[in-house]
Image: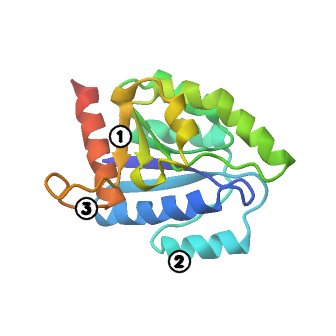
Amino acid sequence: MKVLHIIPSAFNYFDDIRREAFAWLEEENNFGLQSEVITLEYGTTTKKEESEVGVTAPSRQFLGQQPISENANSWDRYDIINLHCPFFGAASQIISWAQANPNKALVVTYHNDFRTPDFFSLIIKFYNLYYLPKVFSIAKAVCFLVNRRSQSRGGISTLKNDKKAFVLGQISDELDIHKTDIVSDLILVYNNTTLTNTN
């Protein structure tokens, strides 16, 4: 299975999401998935970002800023696009790709609600308020983290179709053989989404 992760990396607003997503990406490759990544970048890639990614995902090459319009042309070779949210940029390309490729799967991983410490972050917040409902409506699955329910209320209330919702990191001694392993749960979502998409 080929998975493309689209990870926000605008300035320092998404540092936590970038670190988390790259760690998951590294683990997915250890499970045998062919996982690759692009970042939604504004500004130049910093040495700090390159260093963090090098430590978190040593087998991945961090290319930094890439023109999304050129990159979107190659997305058809992936089975799944996993968009990490909240995000900033490329929403129209992502929605267009999902509409043009109904046999593929757009999976959204919602990390937590976006915080607004300054004026520019308000623009990012309004961007998400406008685009998240559109992205959620076209996605095949929307994943939330069990340990961040209180920090994800905005995302949870935006999702109008509960059948698309998946919770990563559930703890259930009877049903969940991997306990709180986020990546194993994410792979189950990929498999479920791919199987559902082919029927």
Label 2: state its secondary structure.
helix
Q: Earlier in the sequence, mark 3 or mark 1?
A: 1
User: What residue occupies the far left of the structure in this picture?
Assistant: 174
In the rendered image, residue 127, in percent from the top left (x then y), is placed at 71, 34
Give the Cα distance between marks 1 and 2.
Answer: 29 Å
Where residue 166 appears, x then y in whole percent?
35, 40
Given residues 14 and 48, the one toward you in this image is 14
Marks 2 and 3 sit apart, C-alpha to C-alpha, by: 25 Å
What amino acid is at disc 2? Val
* Residue that numbered label 2 is attached to: 55
Q: Which residue is mark 1?
A: 166
- Which one is closest to the eye, mark 1 or mark 2? 1
- x then y, percent, for residue 168: 36, 50
Q: The residue under label 1 is which amino acid type?
A: Phe
Answer with mark 2 or mark 3, whichever residue precedes in sequence. 2
Q: Which of the image's four quarters has the C terminus?
A: top left
Is residue 34 positioned above or below 77 on the image?
below
Q: CA distance from mark 3 to mark 1?
A: 15 Å
| Mark 3, secondary structure of its residue | loop
